Amino acid sequence: MSHLNQPEEKAALLARVRRLKGQIEAIERAVEAERDCGKILHLLASVRGAVSGLTAELFESHLTHHIREIDDPEARRLGAEELSRALRVYLK
């Protein structure tokens, strides 16, 4: 079962995603308006930081809810395998 069904955790993640959406839209507007490259690069750096923060939060949340707090060894093993696969993809 997903731990993202907890209202406060889901709300926090959705807030981060919505901020990211706004940052991406700002990049789109800047490109359309032919803004200075430096401005667009600054916006891109902000998005990169926001994605990294969201990713770290989700990795930590998964670690907490699917490995640390689980008593069932099989469920813990599956949680660790899932985290390992996600890290391999993320680090490529």
Image (spheres, rainbow, N blue to C red):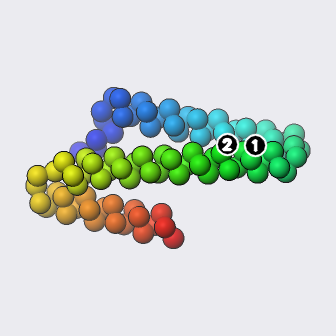
Query: Horizontal and vertical percent for residue 62?
Result: 32, 50
Check if mark 2's residue and mark 1's residue have beta carbons within 8 Å: yes
Please tell me whether residue 73 is drawn above or below residue 4 in the rendered image.
below
Residue type, label 1: Glu
What type is the residue that disc 2 sits on? Answer: Ile
Of 21 and 67, the residue lying toward us = 67
Secondary element under disc 1, as helix, strand or loop, is helix
The image shows residue 13 at horizontal and vertical percentages of 44, 37
* Location of mark 1 (residue): 28
Q: Name the spot of residue 30 as percent of width and height, x first.
A: 81, 41
What residue is at 27 percent from the left and 48 percent from the top? 64
Residue at disc 2, secondary structure: helix
Give the left or right position of residue 46, taking residue 14 as reference. right
At label 2, counting other C-alpha atoms closer than 10 Å, the crowd grade (few under 14, some 14-19, many 20 or more) is some
Against 36, is 88 above or below?
A: below
Residue at x 70%, y 38% (from the top left corner): 25
- The residue pinned by badge 2 equals 24
Distance CA(mark 2)–CA(mark 1): 6 Å
Q: Quadrant of residue 11?
A: top left
